[in-house]
Image (tube, rainbow, N blue to C red):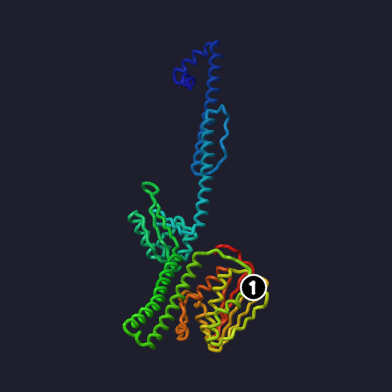
Amino acid sequence: MTVISFFSGEWYHKSAAILLGDKQVLPLVLGSLFLAGILTAIQSVNYRRQKNKIKLLSAKLHDVIKGEEPGHLLLEPSDPYYELARAINGVQSMQRDISKDFITQQRGYFSLMEYLTIGVLVLDQDQKISLSNHAMSELMGREMNVKGQLYVNEVRTYELSRLIEKTFQTHQDQHQEIKIDATNKNVDAHVVYVPVSSRHFLVMALLYDITELKEIERMQMDFVGNVSHELKTPITAITGFIETLLQGAMDDEQTRVEFLKIVYQESLKLTELVEDILSLARIDSKPQLNIIQLDLRDFITDILTTFKPELEKKTIKVHLQIPVGCRVNVDKGKLQHVINNLVQNSIKYNHVDGQIWIDGKIRKEDWYLSIRDTGYGIAKDEQERIFERFYRIDTSRSRQNGGTGLGLSVVKEYVEALAGKIEVKSQVGVGSTFTVTFPLEIKDRLR
């Protein structure tokens, strides 16, 4: 560039004319001009190469920013841009590793959320759904993983929508127990404000299914209420009759005997109720099973001797149809409670001069015991409810015969504790058949 400037303009023309006139200087001038041309050409080529490399490096950086993965730049170590190219390649590798780690963690979080039993719904600050898991869809009764949709179009439970809206307005966490009408689920709802930065935030709704807890709570309240009612009836009768006796009725011998008989009967009912409640408490405490082998026919024969006065009083005949040598593995105490209750019911709700058949047999994979009577029978619509706690058939004869409404529920609990099942077949006016079935081998374990 300097040579070109030097030999330019008017001064160049004058100098050239003088120099060209000197034959000794002419070769030197021509050589200088040739050298200047070569240098200019080299500088032009280097300039274009550097410019292309800069464009290449710039394009590479833009690709890295976009998240694309072009090949690494390979330059000679002597290249002035070699270190810069290495740095850009390093940034690309680091970005690729960070991206892979992020994707792996994100997949892990998504998988974890899908296995959570808690319903999760994440909303962005534009009130659009960002994330939702399967449990949320199950609780809401519809697909909730509709990313980008406004939550007001998808959350169709007023109480939950109100909590979410309040969180958006106040930036404060909200908490309330609500009911999802679509699925009839009771949930403990937490709506949480999650600040991400000074200008961005998320709102997260967490739903805990407490339907089963609510049902247990209701059953506990019903149980307490029923127990209180059942205890109150005999206690009130005992208190009333004793008070009447103390006020002078004891002076009448006939009245005194009659009232004492009533007090005695009511005390027996009270004792029966307490024993049934204690039986339920022992079942709920999950006691350990004590499995032994016993002869079923001999075992039931011994039990029937305890019912001899009641059988003779109603002249009921028992037919024991269990084969000799029928030996089973079972918890003796629990089986005795089951048989006692079923035999007692077959006597209590049987006719005078009635009959009872007790049958049992060992089969290929299990063994069974059935007790059939000629009693009053149970209506079909009540057969499924007789195993509920405190449920009693609402007939005058069943009320007259007493009962706490806990007996068959206790029987069912004991049968299930022994890994068995109980079934009933009955016809009103004909009689009932209760059949219990147990596996051949019952492990000695906790329920």
Image position, residue 101 (x, y; %): 52, 45
Q: Position of residue 233 (x, y in %)?
A: 39, 78
- Quarter the C terminus occupies: bottom right
What is the crowding at mark 1: few (fewer than 14 residues within 10 Å), some, or many (at least 20)? some
- Name which residue lies at 43% across and 76% down: 270
Judge by depth and name the residue closer to the eye, 401 or 304: 304
Q: Position of residue 163 (x, y in %)?
A: 36, 60
Q: Is residue 372 visible?
A: yes
Left or right for 287, reference 245: right
User: Does the rendering let one see residue 182?
Assistant: no
Query: Looking at the image, which residue is at 53% across and 48% down?
Result: 104
- Left or right: residue 325 versus residue 146 is right
Q: Nearer the viewer, residue 202 or 335?
A: 335
How many numbered circles does the render carry? 1
Mark 1 falls on what kind of element? strand
* Viewer-closest of 97 and 11: 97
Question: How far from the left and from the top, in percent, is residue 294?
Answer: 63, 71
Is residue 29 placed above or below 109 in the rendered structure?
above
Residue 355 quadrant? bottom right
Write down the residue under mark 1: 295
- In the image as oriented, which residue stretches furthest toward the left? 247
**Can you say whether 64 is above or below 122 in the image?**
above
The amino acid type found where label 1 is placed reads Asp
